[in-house]
Amino acid sequence: MQKVDVSVVRKFLPDRFVIGLLLMIVAAWLKPGIGMGEGTVNLGSVIDVGVALIFFFYGLKLNPEKIRAGMSNWQMHTAIQLTTFLIFPLIVLPFYPLLKGTPYEIFWMGMFFLAALPSTVSSSVVMVSIAGGNIPGAIFNASISGIIGIVMTPLWMGIFLASGSGSFDFSSVILQLVTQIILPVAGGLLLHRFWVRWVSRYGRQLALFDKTIILLIVYESFSHSFESGIFSNVRVWVLAGLFGCVVALFFVVFGLTGWLAHRLRFNREDRITLLFCGSKKSLVHGSVFASVLFAGISGSGIFLLPIMIYHAFQLFYISLVARKAGAEVFSGSF
């Protein structure tokens, strides 16, 4: 009897974190509202503290010297950041007039939220490394993308949240962004040289902490959505359509980044870096931004659906592309 190659089977299994996200949605559906009352330990307070710590640790990981050193390749950096924060939103933006005022407007908002998010950090660097791309460039762009996103994502979303919801208080959102995100990042940067060894030593534990807070955010968001009945009238074909739109957005941007890299005549390493960093979006930032921007909005779970779908699909597809690129002699396809 032929033995099954465990590595091959493992390659096609879902990511454990993706499974955890699905379990949180199921838990929110079966038992919404756990820890969300007036008890001693409130889930919202735990998430608020967790979000601040995530960005404090993010600041600790940023190396100011490496960021300054990585600024020389300005053409690649500009292409990646423009793709992330301009091209992505501009692809989704034209569909707003078609869906404005319809029951599907909230799904468009979720898609636009996905488009306005920064790129990932760790997975971008790992995939670029596997494919044989420009690793220092990937580290610089992944790091700087998170910093730019602290400003750009709320600015993009504020345009539509402020006009579409009379209860949206932009000043309170700015205050939360400052106290929960900007100040912790600044504090981490200031303490980087003192705590960098500690961060390196406990990197795996910090990654686990990040994922735990994200899972709690997903549970809280979907609890609010299920309790308000926002999903009761959502049909399966609508969710299937959302999945198709997310995947289509990925391939459109992936194709555009490939075309742009070719037009700018990037070398192989820079083309791979633009492809991988420019087409990825961060679930970490998406989850923590959602906990601030959409606090108190009944359909907050829907805002997270597109980025969750995108996260799972980008991990699957780009990991396949990265392995292929790293295994073969480069033939000009990137």
Image (cartoon, rainbow, N blue to C red):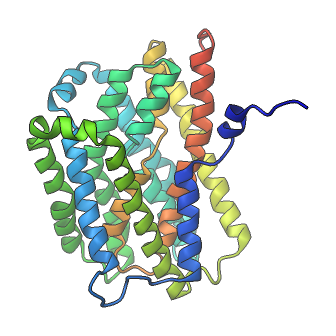
Quarter of the view holding residue 289? bottom left
How many numbered dots are placed on residues in this image?
A: 0
In the rendered view, tell whether residue 100 sits above or below residue 19.
Answer: below
Q: Nearer the viewer, residue 225 or 99?
A: 225
Q: Where is residue 125 in the image (x, y as percent from the top left)?
A: 41, 31
Examine the rendering and report whether any part of residue 94 can be seen: no
Residue furthest out toward the right = 1
Q: Which of 79 and 331 is in front in this view?
A: 331
In the rendered view, tell whether residue 146 sits above or below residue 169.
Answer: above
Q: Where is residue 53 in the image (x, y as percent from the top left)?
A: 23, 57
Report the quarter where the C terminus lies.
Answer: top right
Examine the rendering and report whether any part of residue 191 can be seen: yes
Quarter of the view holding residue 214? bottom left
Q: Where is residue 149 in the image (x, y as percent from the top left)?
A: 30, 49
Report the quarter where the N terminus lies.
Answer: top right
Q: Which of 201 and 84 is in front in this view?
A: 201
Residue furthest out toward the front = 1
In the rendered view, tell whether residue 31 sits above or below residue 89.
Answer: below
Residue in the picture at 33% in, 83% down: 166
Residue in the picture at 58% in, 57% down: 19
Residue in the picture at 34% in, 48% down: 205
Q: Where is residue 162 in the image (x, y as percent from the top left)?
A: 31, 72
Quarter of the view holding residue 329? top right
